[in-house]
Amino acid sequence: MAIAAPAELRSLLRISEPFTEDDSATAVLLLDLALGVIEEEAGQALESATDTLVLDGPSRQDGPYQSGTGTDRLILPRWPVTAVVSVTVDGDVLVHGRHADYTWSAAGVLTRIGAHWPAHDRAVEAVVTAGFTTLPPGLKRIGLRLAAAAWANPEMLASETLGDHARSFSAEALGMQLTEADRRTIGAYRART
Protein backbone atom coordinates (compact mmCIF):
# COMPACT_ATOMS: atom_id res chain seq x y z
CA MET A 1 0.00 0.00 0.00
CA ALA A 2 1.35 3.36 -0.94
CA ILE A 3 0.60 6.27 1.31
CA ALA A 4 -0.45 8.21 -1.79
CA ALA A 5 -0.03 8.11 -5.55
CA PRO A 6 2.87 9.94 -7.23
CA ALA A 7 0.27 12.07 -9.05
CA GLU A 8 -1.06 13.26 -5.67
CA LEU A 9 2.44 14.32 -4.64
CA ARG A 10 2.83 16.10 -8.00
CA SER A 11 -0.44 17.98 -7.38
CA LEU A 12 0.61 18.96 -3.87
CA LEU A 13 3.91 20.27 -5.23
CA ARG A 14 1.97 22.19 -7.92
CA ILE A 15 4.02 20.69 -10.72
CA SER A 16 1.94 21.05 -13.89
CA GLU A 17 4.07 18.82 -16.13
CA PRO A 18 3.56 15.05 -15.87
CA PHE A 19 6.29 13.25 -13.96
CA THR A 20 9.02 11.61 -15.99
CA GLU A 21 9.77 7.95 -15.29
CA ASP A 22 12.63 9.02 -12.98
CA ASP A 23 10.42 11.57 -11.23
CA SER A 24 7.76 8.90 -10.66
CA ALA A 25 10.36 6.51 -9.24
CA THR A 26 11.64 9.25 -6.91
CA ALA A 27 8.08 10.07 -5.82
CA VAL A 28 7.36 6.41 -5.04
CA LEU A 29 10.59 6.17 -3.02
CA LEU A 30 9.84 9.34 -1.04
CA LEU A 31 6.26 8.24 -0.34
CA ASP A 32 7.52 4.82 0.84
CA LEU A 33 10.09 6.50 3.08
CA ALA A 34 7.40 8.79 4.50
CA LEU A 35 5.23 5.76 5.29
CA GLY A 36 8.24 4.22 7.04
CA VAL A 37 8.64 7.31 9.23
CA ILE A 38 4.96 7.17 10.17
CA GLU A 39 5.03 3.42 10.88
CA GLU A 40 8.17 3.82 12.99
CA GLU A 41 6.39 6.43 15.11
CA ALA A 42 3.25 4.26 15.33
CA GLY A 43 5.29 1.21 16.31
CA GLN A 44 3.38 -1.02 13.92
CA ALA A 45 2.94 -1.72 10.23
CA LEU A 46 -0.17 0.11 9.10
CA GLU A 47 -0.81 -1.81 5.89
CA SER A 48 -3.32 -4.61 6.16
CA ALA A 49 -1.56 -7.96 6.48
CA THR A 50 -2.17 -11.39 7.96
CA ASP A 51 0.36 -12.27 10.65
CA THR A 52 0.91 -15.02 13.18
CA LEU A 53 1.26 -13.45 16.61
CA VAL A 54 2.76 -15.49 19.44
CA LEU A 55 1.67 -13.78 22.61
CA ASP A 56 2.78 -14.10 26.19
CA GLY A 57 -0.07 -14.76 28.53
CA PRO A 58 -0.72 -11.81 30.81
CA SER A 59 0.66 -11.86 34.33
CA ARG A 60 -0.54 -10.35 37.58
CA GLN A 61 1.75 -7.36 36.98
CA ASP A 62 -0.08 -6.48 33.73
CA GLY A 63 -2.96 -4.04 33.45
CA PRO A 64 -6.60 -4.61 34.38
CA TYR A 65 -7.51 -6.22 31.04
CA GLN A 66 -5.04 -9.07 31.41
CA SER A 67 -5.95 -12.59 32.45
CA GLY A 68 -3.52 -12.86 35.32
CA THR A 69 -5.76 -10.38 37.09
CA GLY A 70 -8.86 -12.47 36.45
CA THR A 71 -10.07 -10.98 33.21
CA ASP A 72 -11.02 -12.76 30.03
CA ARG A 73 -9.60 -10.15 27.65
CA LEU A 74 -6.32 -10.16 25.74
CA ILE A 75 -5.25 -7.09 23.77
CA LEU A 76 -3.52 -7.69 20.43
CA PRO A 77 -0.58 -5.39 19.61
CA ARG A 78 -1.71 -4.74 16.01
CA TRP A 79 -4.99 -3.11 15.09
CA PRO A 80 -7.46 -2.42 13.56
CA VAL A 81 -8.27 -6.11 13.30
CA THR A 82 -10.33 -7.13 10.27
CA ALA A 83 -10.17 -10.92 10.66
CA VAL A 84 -9.05 -13.59 13.09
CA VAL A 85 -8.15 -16.78 11.23
CA SER A 86 -7.34 -18.88 14.29
CA VAL A 87 -6.46 -18.77 17.98
CA THR A 88 -4.47 -21.54 19.63
CA VAL A 89 -3.88 -21.83 23.38
CA ASP A 90 -1.19 -24.25 24.54
CA GLY A 91 -1.65 -26.26 21.33
CA ASP A 92 -5.46 -26.38 21.44
CA VAL A 93 -7.29 -24.62 18.59
CA LEU A 94 -10.15 -22.50 19.93
CA VAL A 95 -13.53 -22.07 18.25
CA HIS A 96 -14.76 -18.56 17.44
CA GLY A 97 -18.25 -17.48 18.43
CA ARG A 98 -20.35 -15.90 21.18
CA HIS A 99 -21.31 -19.34 22.46
CA ALA A 100 -17.92 -20.95 21.78
CA ASP A 101 -14.35 -20.26 23.03
CA TYR A 102 -13.64 -16.62 22.09
CA THR A 103 -14.79 -13.50 20.25
CA TRP A 104 -12.77 -10.63 18.80
CA SER A 105 -13.25 -6.93 18.07
CA ALA A 106 -11.89 -4.54 15.47
CA ALA A 107 -10.12 -2.77 18.35
CA GLY A 108 -7.94 -5.88 18.72
CA VAL A 109 -9.46 -7.39 21.84
CA LEU A 110 -9.76 -11.18 22.10
CA THR A 111 -12.41 -12.10 24.65
CA ARG A 112 -12.32 -15.60 26.13
CA ILE A 113 -15.76 -17.11 26.74
CA GLY A 114 -16.15 -19.02 30.02
CA ALA A 115 -12.41 -19.08 30.76
CA HIS A 116 -9.33 -16.91 31.22
CA TRP A 117 -6.21 -16.61 29.08
CA PRO A 118 -3.27 -18.60 30.49
CA ALA A 119 -0.67 -16.54 32.36
CA HIS A 120 2.61 -17.82 30.95
CA ASP A 121 5.02 -17.01 28.12
CA ARG A 122 4.13 -17.92 24.52
CA ALA A 123 0.70 -19.11 25.69
CA VAL A 124 -1.44 -17.84 22.80
CA GLU A 125 -0.91 -18.01 19.04
CA ALA A 126 -3.30 -15.90 16.98
CA VAL A 127 -3.39 -15.62 13.20
CA VAL A 128 -4.93 -12.22 12.54
CA THR A 129 -5.42 -9.76 9.71
CA ALA A 130 -4.84 -6.24 10.95
CA GLY A 131 -4.12 -2.83 9.47
CA PHE A 132 -5.62 -0.49 6.93
CA THR A 133 -6.40 -1.09 3.26
CA THR A 134 -6.53 2.69 2.83
CA LEU A 135 -4.74 4.97 5.27
CA PRO A 136 -6.80 7.45 7.27
CA PRO A 137 -6.71 11.00 5.80
CA GLY A 138 -4.63 12.42 8.67
CA LEU A 139 -1.84 9.89 8.08
CA LYS A 140 -2.00 10.46 4.32
CA ARG A 141 -1.66 14.21 4.87
CA ILE A 142 1.42 13.69 7.05
CA GLY A 143 2.97 11.32 4.50
CA LEU A 144 2.42 13.71 1.60
CA ARG A 145 3.88 16.58 3.61
CA LEU A 146 6.98 14.56 4.51
CA ALA A 147 7.50 13.46 0.91
CA ALA A 148 6.98 17.02 -0.36
CA ALA A 149 9.57 18.35 2.12
CA ALA A 150 12.11 15.78 0.93
CA TRP A 151 11.29 16.55 -2.73
CA ALA A 152 11.74 20.31 -2.22
CA ASN A 153 15.01 19.92 -0.31
CA PRO A 154 16.68 16.68 -1.46
CA GLU A 155 20.12 17.68 -0.19
CA MET A 156 18.68 18.59 3.24
CA LEU A 157 20.26 22.04 3.10
CA ALA A 158 19.79 24.49 5.96
CA SER A 159 20.27 27.39 3.55
CA GLU A 160 21.28 28.03 -0.04
CA THR A 161 22.84 31.03 -1.79
CA LEU A 162 23.12 31.57 -5.55
CA GLY A 163 24.58 34.97 -6.42
CA ASP A 164 22.47 37.59 -4.69
CA HIS A 165 19.61 35.13 -4.03
CA ALA A 166 19.54 33.32 -0.69
CA ARG A 167 16.97 31.14 1.01
CA SER A 168 16.74 29.30 4.32
CA PHE A 169 14.74 26.20 5.15
CA SER A 170 12.78 25.65 8.33
CA ALA A 171 13.87 22.81 10.61
CA GLU A 172 10.92 20.72 9.41
CA ALA A 173 12.03 21.14 5.77
CA LEU A 174 15.46 19.65 6.49
CA GLY A 175 14.16 16.15 5.94
CA MET A 176 11.36 13.85 6.95
CA GLN A 177 10.86 15.24 10.43
CA LEU A 178 7.60 14.82 12.31
CA THR A 179 6.11 17.78 14.12
CA GLU A 180 4.53 17.47 17.56
CA ALA A 181 1.12 17.74 15.89
CA ASP A 182 2.10 14.85 13.58
CA ARG A 183 3.15 12.77 16.60
CA ARG A 184 -0.19 13.43 18.30
CA THR A 185 -2.08 12.39 15.16
CA ILE A 186 0.01 9.22 14.71
CA GLY A 187 -0.34 8.47 18.43
CA ALA A 188 -3.97 7.54 17.84
CA TYR A 189 -2.72 4.62 15.69
CA ARG A 190 0.10 3.46 17.97
CA ALA A 191 0.66 -0.24 18.57
CA ARG A 192 -0.24 -1.50 22.01
CA THR A 193 2.62 -3.25 23.74
Image (cartoon, rainbow, N blue to C red):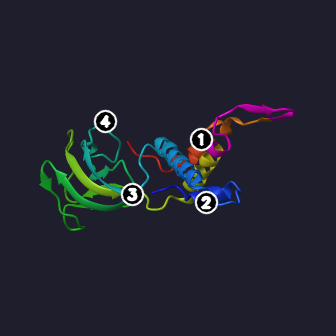
Expressed as whole percent of the image width and height from the top left, the position of residue 148 reads 64, 48
Which one is in front, 72 or 43? 43
Decide whether residue 27 is among the magenta residues: no
Residue at (31% x, 36% y) in the render: 61
Q: What kind of residue is marked 1?
A: Leu
Q: CA distance from mark 2 to mark 3?
A: 22 Å
Q: CA distance from mark 2 to mark 4?
A: 47 Å
Q: What kind of residue is marked 4?
A: Gln
Q: Which residue is disc 3 drawn over? A: 48
Decide which of tag 3 and tag 1 comes sooner along the chain: 3
Which type of secondary structure does the marked residue at label 4 adopt?
loop
Which type of secondary structure does the marked residue at label 3 adopt?
loop
Residue at (71% x, 60% y) in the render: 16
Region rendered in magenta: 150-166
Count of labels shown? 4
Q: Which residue is disc 4 drawn over? A: 61
Q: Is residue 82 above or below residue 153?
A: below
**Mark 2 or mark 1: which is in front?**
2
Q: Which residue is disc 2 drawn over? A: 8
Decide which of tag 2 and tag 4 comes sooner along the chain: 2
Query: Is 53 on the left or on the right of 172, as rendered?
Result: left
Q: CA distance from mark 4 to mark 3?
A: 31 Å
Mark drawn on residue 137: none
Q: What kind of residue is marked 2?
A: Glu
Does the image show residue 127? yes
Does the image show residue 104? no
Decide which of tag 4 and tag 3 comes sooner along the chain: 3
Which type of secondary structure does the marked residue at label 1 adopt?
loop
Q: Which residue is disc 1 drawn over? A: 178
